[in-house]
Image: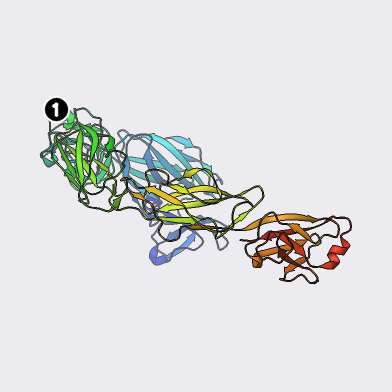
Amino acid sequence: MNNSRMVSNGGYGIGSQLPHPSQSRHGQLFVFTGDLGIELELMIFDGFRNEWIPHSSSNSVNGGVFFVDAFPQGEGNVGAKVYSDRTNTTLESVITDTDLINVKLLAVTGNTRFAPEITFESELIEFTQVGSQPLFEATIPVNIEGKSELKVFHEDGAYHTLKVVKEDKPMVQEAYFTGEYINNQTELKENDTHSLFIKSDVKLQSIQIQDFGAAKSKTVSADSNENALEITIANRGDSPQLLPVRFRVQSETGSWSDWVSTSDFGNKEKVNVLSLNNLHPTITFYNIIYPSYQEALKNNESAVINSSISNSDLVSYSSPNSQLDIINSQDYEQLKAVTRMSGDYNVTATNFRIVAHRVANGSTTTLNRVVNIAHVPPIITLQPQHDRFQSSDTGSNYWIRVNSTQQLIEPPVLSIPHGTWINEFTSSNKTQWQRTIQISDTDTKGKHSIISMSARSLSNQVVNLFEGTDTYEIGGFKNRQIYFPPFQHTMPLGTSVTDVSKLVVIDLAGYVFNYKDHLSHQTHTFTIVDENGNIDPNGAYIRLTDNGVISANSGGDYFIYVEETI
């Protein structure tokens, strides 16, 4: 049996199940791990007997050694790898564009010793065992200059041959730009495109554009030795420059050429170099000048937009929603007048636009702004914090809000008949204004109307009436503790009662007292009276009508908690 054909043409595999004879070839090796994956035995396929037999019982040499991979030591390519088995393990041949490569070897235990001695290039190779298996691997650097094959030898007779084919790197023969600049420009800006033609000495599979010179990085597929592609222009600054494109090409076998620049073939614009300039127009916005005491337009009022433009050849002004009339819309003016044409209220949607254009590189800069419109007056509503404001002896604070359907140019002005304003109206959005009102026991209870109101819109329209209610209510009082002197029934509340149904009375023992409208004795009851002791549901005095509680209060330490809730 010829050992070279056995190893090179047969290959090897590993597993717990032997390949079927119909899928095996004479001389093929297989590392059999057994059913439990522990017991290992090297098997060889006997094509004459059409069966797998132990390698040690065959008439062949013992052991096995194989090339399983190859790759460059540094730059370069090792490709077109051909394997002799279906698992792509036994490497038979490669094509490389570099002499300095690494080869990976795999050795199988033979008869002589468990860790076999392997010779490569007349030197013994140091191997590392693969786990606990009788397999050993090593990666060896080799210089293939002048060689067409590599051989590795097992001490028990097996050997393997790897064919190596040295090829030159692909060469770029021509590279030049084609066509005119996009949109008849005289310069190119970022993200413009331009066509590039590349011719090489071999058929290519890809072209890599470097982020350098005129182009952004890009990799494109290729299928010929003549390829036309589109490059994307990079941003290289706001001044004119003549710049090339740098690239490299990859052959079908995977070899890359050296980096090539289009300027290697000359320095002619639009052929070898491109003119780049990323300069864009600059629009500087300063302010909008409205009529006096206004921040918006109404009727046919006018405003002036103050802005400046540089690095521009063409300028246009427009109103995207047709709310504004713009005089001389194609002429640059730092102070551009606009007049309201339509729109009831707008403080958010763009209605004024400047577009500045630079012809040389086709660059455009756009500025969007809102010229405020408040043609119709705002709707104003009043929002108290609660349905009723409870009072207290030291004063309790609540808020009152004035809500507007439009932004107001200044805080609203409200005059109230009862309660005390604290601080001023404030707002985070100019539509919802809030101010603190303080309610004391001395403030008159009941519903009260706002005396006067003034709300001024952005266009200086004044509203004096609320939509809906213009009232707030003072009613009830905060929880308070009232002590009763010895054997006394009646004590002042400090303020008048508005609604007896909302009174809550609890004594020091936790008993809840109920209201009644007469003075007769009843356990855990009370009534409301005036200063003369007469029953008055709106009185300012509380009378306990539980005689047992009164007679027991000999020390004057009895007290109750009382509140009129909201």
Say if residue 431 shows up in the picture.
no
Is 214 positioned to the left or the right of 452 in the image? left
**Crowding near pointer 1: few (<14 within 10 Å), some, many (20+)?**
some
User: x, y (%) of residue 301?
Assistant: 22, 44
Say if residue 450 shows up in the picture.
yes
Residue farthest front in this picture: 532
The quarter of the picture where residue 294 lies is: top left
Q: Look at the picture and state if 7 lies above or below 164.
A: below
User: x, y (%) of residue 252?
Assistant: 25, 46
Q: Give 492 or 561, whichever is nearer the viewer.
A: 492
Is 381 positioned to the left or the right of 281 in the image? right
Label 1: state its secondary structure: loop
Q: Give, as a three-letter code, the residue at label 1.
A: Asn
According to the image, label 1 marks what residue?
A: 267
User: x, y (%) of residue 500?
Assistant: 66, 66
User: x, y (%) of residue 53?
Assistant: 48, 61
Q: Look at the picture and state if 331 lies above or below 63.
A: above
Q: How is the image coloured?
A: rainbow
Is 84 positioned to the left or the right of 258 in the image? right
Q: Give 421 or 280, whichever is nearer the viewer.
A: 421
Number of disc labels:
1
Is 561 positioned to the left or the right of 176 in the image? right
Q: Give 444 or 455, whichever is nearer the viewer.
A: 444
Assign the C terminus to one quadrant of the image.
bottom right
Q: Give 98 or 405, whichever is nearer the viewer.
A: 405
Q: Look at the picture and state if 335 lies above or below 480.
A: above
Assign the N terminus to one quadrant of the image.
bottom left
